[in-house]
């Protein structure tokens, strides 16, 4: 199940992994369509896995969250790394946040809800956000950290993780993401992505058990 070059995806509202489902509705379908069209298979699968990791974390901790808002943010969070949406001045998460504002305006979301989607995407690259402060941003941080570097992976049920990887394989994600982050370092040395690279991103990705699954 993945995005493809022609923008199609087999991920639908019926997709279920360990009792967790993709949200229903036009916003979720549109986010899937856009992510599948602009992201390659590895980046698309990472985006969906980040949602499922975050949703599983919320279920385990009995955290209430806005499923639609979180899903849309998760599907758009890395599109600032793709060529059509990469900015020569903005960090990729900030470019992704601006993309989210435009995308959700087309959905008819209020300004406040559009701002929230952008905020979640930007904050996933910032210092840890507690769930009590901003649950959706917290969930995206948990989901992306688990998937990129394996941080907190031991907290997830191994059966859930195995099913997630079966339905949404890595497809070379680790190496491709590191190359994208290296490019951010080269062009935007003051960005959060640059900081990840200089603080040992390559080693963390190599040590992630998901890269060997």
Image (cartoon, rainbow, N blue to C red):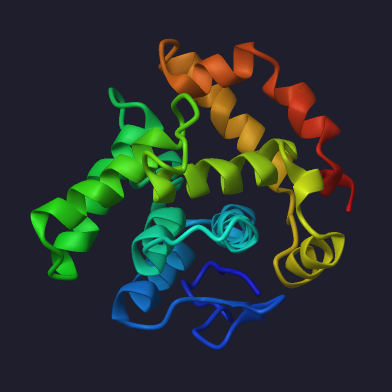
Residue sitting at x 10%, y 54% = 111
> Residue, x 25% and y 49% (percent of image)?
116
Q: Residue furthest bottom?
A: 14
Question: Which quadrant is home to the N terminus?
Answer: bottom right
- Rendering coords of residue 55 (x, y %): 56, 62
- Write down the quadrant of residue 160 in the picture: bottom right
- Closest to the observer: 175 or 77? 77
> 112 or 29, which is in the foreground?
112
> In the rendered picture of this protein, how many numbered marks are placed on residues?
0
Question: Can I make out residue 175 in this image?
Answer: no
Q: Position of residue 118 (x, y in %)?
A: 27, 45
At horizontal 48% and vertical 67% (from top left) the residue drawn is 36
Q: In this view, does 99 lie above or below 95?
A: below
Q: In this view, does 68 lie above or below 115?
A: below
Q: In which quarter of the image is residue 73?
A: bottom left
Please state the horizontal and vertical placement of residue 49, each as a whole percent of the image: 62, 59
Residue at (61% x, 54% y) in the render: 46
Q: Which residue lies furthest to the right in this view?
A: 212
* Residue 6 visible to the viewer: yes
Q: Is residue 65 left or right of residue 201?
A: left
> What x and y, as percent, mark residue 149?
71, 36
């Amino acid at each position: 199940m993945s995005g493809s070059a022609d923008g199609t995806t087999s991920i639908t509202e019926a997709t279920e992994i360990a009792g967790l489902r993709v949200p229903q509705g036009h916003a979720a379908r549109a986010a899937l369509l856009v992510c599948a069209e602009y992201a390659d298979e590895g980046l698309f699968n990472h985006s969906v896995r980040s949602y499922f990791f975050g949703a599983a974390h919320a279920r385990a901790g009995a955290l209430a969250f806005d499923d639609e808002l979180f899903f849309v943010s998760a599907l758009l969070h890395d599109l600032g790394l793709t060529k059509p949406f990469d900015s020569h001045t903005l960090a990729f998460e900030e470019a992704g946040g601006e993309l989210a504002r435009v995308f959700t305006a087309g959905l008819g979301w209020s300004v406040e809800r559009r701002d929230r989607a952008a905020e979640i995407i930007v904050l996933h690259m910032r210092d840890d956000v507690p769930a009590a402060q901003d649950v959706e941003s917290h969930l995206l941080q948990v989901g992306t950290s688990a998937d990129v570097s394996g941080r907190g992976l031991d907290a997830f049920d191994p059966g859930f993780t195995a099913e997630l990887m079966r339905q949404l394989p890595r497809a070379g994600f680790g190496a491709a993401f590191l190359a994208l982050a290296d490019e951010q370092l080269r062009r935007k040395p003051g960005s959060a992505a640059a900081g990840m690279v200089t603080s040992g991103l390559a080693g963390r990705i190599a040590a992630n058990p998901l890269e060997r699954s």
